[in-house]
Image (cartoon, rainbow, N blue to C red):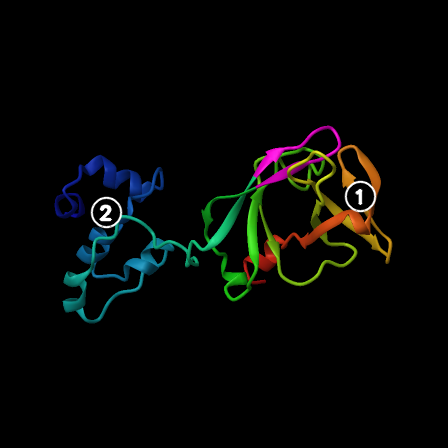
Amino acid sequence: HIAEHNDTDVAAVGNWETGRNLPKTENLLKTAAFLRVDPVALGKGEVVFLDDADNVADAEIVTDAAPLPGGPMDIELLGAAVGGDDGDFTFNGEVAGYVQRPPGIAHLRKVFALHVLSDSMVPRYEPGEMLYCGGRDAVPGDHVVIEMFPEENERNGKAFIKKLVKRTAAELVVEQYNPPKSLTFNRYAIKHVWRVIPLKELLGY
């Protein structure tokens, strides 16, 4: 009867019953309607009978699960170019596009995103990974994006992704993972320091 109601073959229903495979969402809802049980509970492996059979006939056929709530596509993805031997990358001064705002930073202003281009922070950040930067000022222990003032004959200053170790009036001490080493920057040569927002904060934890 279930096979006839769902317009599927008996063998397919037999596979559902024996657990060899699972029905698609559409077939799960049709089966729930036929048996007069709660489709949400059935999807979890539970059987909850519906007292009001009239509601069953109105069950919607849903083909895809609802997406997770996401924010607007209003975060600037800043363009960057691969740096030389002594820089992770350089900002090219352009906006490459816009990316979605994660729920944890729904109301945070002055946030931007960028793609990791170097392997100096592997395994923490892989090349191609997208980072969100901004929010509160960075403190030791935070990962940071550092942009230097351009040197002579340079249009854009070098930029780095590192872990902040220490900050004094005259210098910034950071570390990288690949290869492991410590670096010191002159504070007066630094144009900007942005904090990399951790994943758990982006998700609102």
**Taking 127 as reference, is 87 left or right?**
right
- State how far apart marks 1 and 2 are (Cα): 54 Å
What residue do we see at 84% from left, 41% from top? 182
What residue do we see at 45% from left, 55% from top? 74
**Taking 159 as reference, is 24 left or right?**
left
What residue do we see at 24% from left, 48% from top? 26
Q: Nearer the viewer, residue 167 or 19?
A: 167
Pointer 1 residue: 175
Instruction: Specify whether residue 50 is in view.
Output: yes
Magenta region, residue range: 80-92
What amino acid is at disc 2? Asn
Residue 100: x %, y % from top left: 46, 52
- Taking the view exactly as shown, the residue that stands out farthest to the front is 153
> Does the magenta segment cover residue 89?
yes
> Which quarter shows the C terminus?
bottom right
Pointer 2 residue: 27
What amino acid is at disc 1? Glu
Dot 1, crowdedness within 10 Å: few (<14), some or many (≥20)? many
Residue 36: x %, y % from top left: 21, 61
